[in-house]
Image (tube, helix red, strand yellow):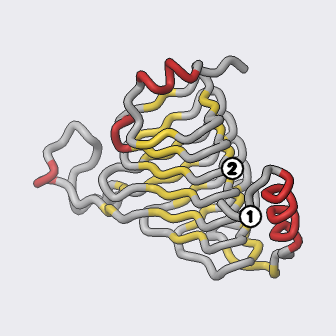
């Protein structure tokens, strides 16, 4: 995988760009002036990132992901990640037939759902999953592959299915590993 150089990343005009950020030169990044990416985060091949997006530290976005932040935005907190083909939307057309749809139609003829999406610290979203506008995936949650998340979650749960539902609690062992990593890097917190 080939990444943009630090100079190329700086020239793209990000709202904020941390240290050791890696972005594939095959990713499509739009609205860089609305995108913040913190230290040690990586965006892989063929991802599309657009609109208002905030990415924390130690975040990984695997190939073929879509993050459509729109006006209200998507936030991914530290140590969160997206597996292959995850799609996150902060806005969606009304599919009921009551209004027109698609971006070529003036907004007065549409009824879009627009609401921020938030992924808490240590959230992992499995391959092929979809996250709808207004969803808050709480700290420590994991979402199984091919899940549809249309409602917010409670912390430290394992969710899966269509629609996604909590199936059991998630272990918190990774918090100790986070502390060890940060100590080895010479930092107590990020």
Q: Residues within 10 Å of mark 2 (few under 14, many from 20)?
A: many
Helix, strand or loop for disc 1: loop
| Mark before the other along the chain sequence, 2 or 1 | 2
The quadrant of the image that shows the N terminus is: top right
C-alpha separation, residue under disc 2 versus residue under disc 1: 15 Å
Q: Position of residue 82 (x, y in %)?
A: 67, 49
Compared across the picture, whether 162 is left or right of 37 comes to right
Residue lying at the far left in this picture: please name it. 108
Location of residue 160 in the rendering, given as x and y in whole percent from the top left corner: 73, 68
Secondary structure beneath dot 2 equals: loop
| Residue of label 1 | 188
Q: Nearer the viewer, mark 2 or mark 1?
A: 1
**Is 188 situated left or right of 113 in this image?**
right
Task: Judge the density around disc 1: few (<14), some (14-19), many (≥20) Cα neighbours within 10 Å.
Answer: few
Specify whether 16 is left or right of 150: left
Q: 148 and 33: which one is in front?
A: 33
> Which residue position is annotated with label 2?
58
Question: In the rendered view, does 190 fall on the left or right side of 112?
Answer: right
């Amino acid at each position: 995988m080939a990444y943009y150089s630090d100079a190329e990343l700086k020239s793209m005009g990000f709202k904020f760009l941390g240290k050791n950020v890696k972005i594939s030169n095959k990713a499509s990044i739009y609205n860089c002036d609305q995108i913040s990416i913190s230290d040690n985060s990586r965006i892989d091949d063929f991802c599309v990132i657009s609109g208002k997006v905030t990415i924390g530290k130690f975040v990984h976005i695997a190939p073929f992901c879509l993050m459509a932040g729109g006006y209200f935005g998507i936030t991914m907190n530290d140590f969160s990640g997206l597996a292959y083909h995850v799609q996150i939307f902060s806005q969606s057309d009304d599919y009921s037939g009551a209004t027109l749809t698609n971006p070529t139609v003036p907004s007065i003829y549409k009824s879009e759902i627009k609401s921020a999406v938030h992924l808490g610290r240590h959230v992992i979203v499995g391959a092929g999953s979809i996250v709808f506008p207004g969803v808050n995936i709480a700290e420590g949650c994991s979402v199984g592959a091919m899940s549809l998340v249309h409602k917010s979650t409670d912390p430290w749960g394992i969710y899966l299915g269509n629609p996604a539902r909590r199936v059991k609690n998630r272990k918190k062992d990774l918090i100790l590993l986070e502390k060890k990593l940060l100590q080895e890097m010479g930092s107590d917190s990020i």
